[in-house]
Amino acid sequence: MAKVDTSLVAHLPLFSGVKPEDLEEILREARSARYPRNSAIFEQGADAQSFFLLLHGHVRAAKTTPTGEQIVVRYVAPGETFGLAMAIGAAHYPATAMAVDDSVVLIWPNSAWPRLIERFPAIAANTLQTVGARLQESHTRILEMSTQQVEQRVAHALLRLAKQSGRKLDHGIEIDFPISRQDIAQMTGTTLHTVSRILSGWESQGLVESGRQRIILRDPHKIVVLAERTADGNSA
Amino acid sequence: MAKVDTSLVAHLPLFSGVKPEDLEEILREARSARYPRNSAIFEQGADAQSFFLLLHGHVRAAKTTPTGEQIVVRYVAPGETFGLAMAIGAAHYPATAMAVDDSVVLIWPNSAWPRLIERFPAIAANTLQTVGARLQESHTRILEMSTQQVEQRVAHALLRLAKQSGRKLDHGIEIDFPISRQDIAQMTGTTLHTVSRILSGWESQGLVESGRQRIILRDPHKIVVLAERTADGNSA
DNA sequence: CAGGCAGTTTGCGATAGCGCAAAACGGGCC
DNA sequence: GGCCCGTTTTGCGCTATCGCAAACTGCCTG
């Protein structure tokens, strides 16, 4: 297994407050692995045996109901951790993680966690902050689902994706991994049909350009306006 | 200010792994305060200056949109922490906390947090677990909002409240604090009208007994069945 | 004990978005 | 280069739920 250069990960939030010379010791406990596009990293309900740090690629975390419906919990971008079941005291993974692009991850065995946070308390504090940030995002999402129409929610979702994983083009911002109408529906609590209709509408207005698992925001500013418009068209 | 008996809080998850003799030192940094029913403890957006542990009563955490709509983030039960903005790296409170019943809380200044987790790393680990648990609850809530009808969501919400803060009566389980139709609507992403209709229906079937800010689950088992029924009436 | 008010109930349209079905499309693979 | 399959588009009826309005009720207050 190739050794990971500490300089690649030293600046990540997870390791803030950790001395560079300690980093090597931390990385020694991890192994790295490559997951090809569309391969599963772990399955919801499985025994949680490891936790992960994404180095390259993109990972989708999704939760499935007993009846088979799915929602996308989040997309993981490079530099972010995922599969932290151990840290939050869960014995099983609460979601399924799948690589949506060829991805490279660092993998620590769960057994390393207690030792890690004992020797480097900053890691516990950093993780608390990222989990807290995710909690706030979840609350925001709940707020949106409770108060906004589907079109606004889709607008917000795309803007968030663009910010997190957007690649700047001269004619807009492209979401940097394959994402389907269905995926967006599962992020916003609607159906792929409705998403498709919305994107078609936007496309004809020149706001986006999209195709098979590909979306480019051509006019992010107008989409921001859409996202903030209230149901009554901001008549107030 | 009255001194808090360590034996009252020693068993709380927050302090698990903390030696009893250290507990007094921790409590010495806190002050206690009483909030009468319907008084605000902190407001969304205000500078986060303290974090809280609820001793008695019940607290509602709610988030408000720019346009004034609210959702209930959660109800805090005795023994739970709230207002952890500092711990999760937020400078401002992301929600408003209001006592829904006469309540007693312990209050630590944020400045105590770094010292606390440095001296007692178990507290950071414990907090990480509770925040993680809240994150999972949020995801469950998002899943429900995405896949279930309003009636199922209301059923789930009431069952959760009953489990968290239910008082057993001989003729059912009563939710142990004042809660309105509006509150339930704000927990489930619907309107008070729809909640009222649903509860009226249940009442006529003898599933619940309810009135002004008061709900008793008369037949929790049947409500569980309702909660799990799929949209097509479980025809499969 | 009488108001008054917050909370609740209920009726009645209006509609956003779902669900189903079918056709069109696009791209990768052989 | 053509075929096949997953994705996307689009039409159409349906309904769960909203939104508004109005009446009702039970507490708490003065």
Image (spheres, coloured by chain):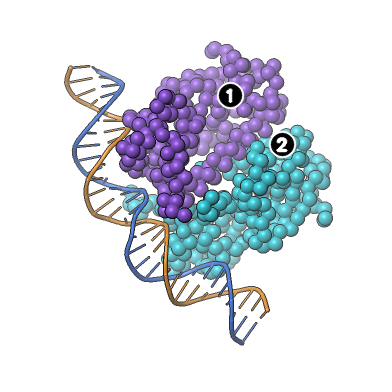
Chain colours: A cyan, B purple, C orange, D blue
User: Which image quarter is the N terminus of chain A in?
Assistant: bottom right
Q: Tell me the residue at 70%/49% (across/down).
A: A53
- Local packing at callout 2 (Cα closer than 10 Å; few below 14, some 14-19, many 20+) is many
* Vertical side of D10 occupied by B166: above or below: above
In this rendering, the count of numbered labels is 2
Q: Tell me the residue at 62%/22% (across/down).
A: B11
Query: Seen in the image, is C12 located left or right of residue A178?
Result: left
* Vertical side of A37 occupied by B122: above or below: above
Distance of label 1 from label 2 (alpha carbons): 21 Å
Identify the chain of the residue marked 2, using the numbered disc in the image: A
Q: Are marks 1 and 2 on the same chain?
A: no
Identify the chain of the residue marked 1, using the numbered disc in the image: B
Q: Which of B17 and A19 lies nearest the eye of the viewer?
A: B17
Q: Tag 1's secondary structure?
A: strand
Residue located beneath label 1 in the image = B108
Q: Tag 2's secondary structure?
A: helix
Answer yes or no: is residue B127 visible. yes
Residue B163's spot in the image, x, y percent? Answer: 49, 32
Q: Tell me the residue at 74%/51% (across/down).
A: A106
Answer yes or no: is residue B97 visible. no
Q: Tell me the residue at 37%/29% (across/down).
A: B214
* Vertical side of A50 occupied by B107: above or below: above
Q: Quadrant of residue B139?
A: top right
Q: Amino acid at mark 1?
A: Trp
Residue located beneath label 2 in the image = A122
Residue B169's spot in the image, x, y percent? Answer: 42, 24
Residue A138's spot in the image, x, y percent? Answer: 53, 45
